[in-house]
Image: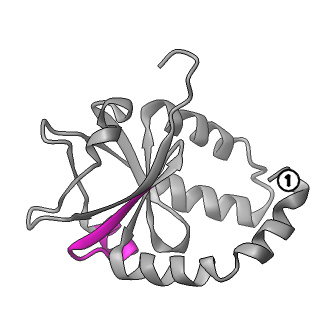
Amino acid sequence: MGLNPIMFIGEYKYTIDSKKRLALPLKFRKELGKKIIVTKGTNNCLVVYTEKGWKEYAEKLGKMPASQPEARTFARIVLAGAMESLVDKLGRILVPDYLKTYAGLEKDVVVCGLSDRLEVWDSTKWEEYKNSAEKEVDSLISKLGNLGI
């Protein structure tokens, strides 16, 4: 990877097969590597990290103040909800029942590239979320202006 950061972008439609396997986008497989980490994300989606990306994120979670109940709760949900998954020769990962249930994944899913990570959404929930969020783009931009966006 050198000095180039990983850049996952776009949205891709896939299905989870009867054996609970989900294929990851072909264009991301090399950067993802042989082992990835999947955990619970916000808005009831799943988040997929590379090993390196997960290590960096988990370190940040570990540095959150244990004195704050919100920090403890968030770290517990994300860290306890995480699992390592091997990527098979066809680029598929196994999605365990507890993560499928959390994200409401049945068959049709959308895999979204978000720079350094992927999100996995139930296809219907993604469309609802995206349609709602797109209506708020102007408002979001003005609110994020102070962050240099």
- Residue 26 higher or lower than 67, as above or below: above
Relative horizontal placement of residue 124, taking residue 135 as reference (left or right) = left
Q: Give SS at disc 1.
A: helix
Residue lying farthest right?
146
Q: Amino acid at mark 1?
A: Leu
Question: Does the magenta portion include 68?
Answer: no
Relative horizontal placement of residue 95, taking residue 120 as reference (left or right) = left
Q: Nearer the viewer, residue 35 or 29?
A: 29
User: What is the magenta range?
Assistant: 98-112
Query: Residue 97 at what x, y percent from top left?
Result: 25, 68
Choose top left, top right, bottom left or bottom right for residue 135. bottom right
Residue lying farthest front?
138
Check disc 1 and report the residue beneath it: 147
Query: How was the colour assigned to the protein in this rendering?
Result: one colour
Query: Residue 129 at what x, y percent from top left?
Result: 52, 79
Residue ID at (85%, 50%): 148
Query: Residue 142 at what x, y percent from top left?
Result: 85, 69
Residue 5 at least partly seen: yes
Residue lying farthest top?
2
Query: Residue 28 at what x, y percent from top left?
Result: 35, 39
- Residue 58 higher or lower than 22, as above or below: above
